[in-house]
Image (cartoon, grey):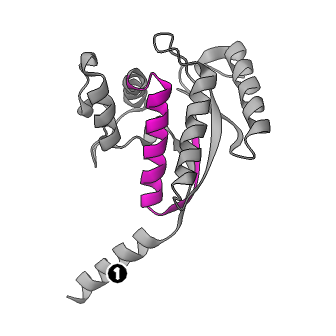
Amino acid sequence: MEAEEQQRWKTTFYSELPKVELHAHLNGSISSNTMKKLIAKKPGLKIHDQMTMIDKGKKRTLEECFQMFQIIHQLTTSPEDILMVTKDVIKEFADDGVKYLELRSTPRKDSATGMTKKTYVESVLEGIKQSKRENLDIDVRYLISIDRRGGPLVAKETVKLAEEFFLSTEGTVLGLDLSGDPTVSNFS
């Protein structure tokens, strides 16, 4: 009985303990509930949620994780998708007791939906703003990621985009992140 009570106390203690998350990839933080909402919006893609989930206790290789991200990118093609994902991710981190969150994500464009890299970033920032207005007890910052597979020209574009938002978001955009599959390209 005493061990059971101690376990309950530990569970309560750790769930209520304020937390900091300094390395949260937006697309890597999408919950199964949010994934189901995205899949429902795009039934023509024939994607089921097991294609995007890592079950508890199951391990995936780095290559399998990047394949999973390709599927997630098919589901997040519009500014509305990015806004919904951002808000859901922030709320779920707040529900877990995270008080400070640094999100990172690579701006993407999608010609079919008209999403540009700039509207991608604006959607992430709008999600952060809306979460603040909902009085969630969490401080969220954003690092704009450079995908190492894009090469120097894409990296320069991303740096310019980050600089623009760094100067205009009162500290919400903190800086840059280098992301993507490290086995694909030597970024120098």
- The single residue placed furthest to the left in the displayed view is 1
**Residue 106 seen from this side:** no
Q: Which residue in the structure is indicated by mark 1?
A: 9
Q: x, y percentage for residue 115?
A: 53, 19
As for residue 10 lying within the magenta part, the answer is no
Q: x, y percentage for residue 52?
A: 32, 32
- The single residue placed furthest to the front in the displayed view is 133
Vertical relation: 12 (above or below) 6 = above
Amino acid at circle 1? Trp
- Residue 99 image-quadrant placement: bottom right
Vertical relation: 122 (above or below) 47 = below
- Residue 76 image-quadrant placement: top left
- The single residue placed furthest to the bottom in the displayed view is 2
Vertical relation: 158 (above or below) 123 = above
In the foreground, 134 or 2: 134
In the foreground, 113 or 27: 113
Q: Give the residue drawn at x 76%, y 37%.
A: 168
Provide the major secondary structure of the magenta segment. Answer: helix
Give the magenta range: 75-104
Quarter in which the C terminus is drawn: top right
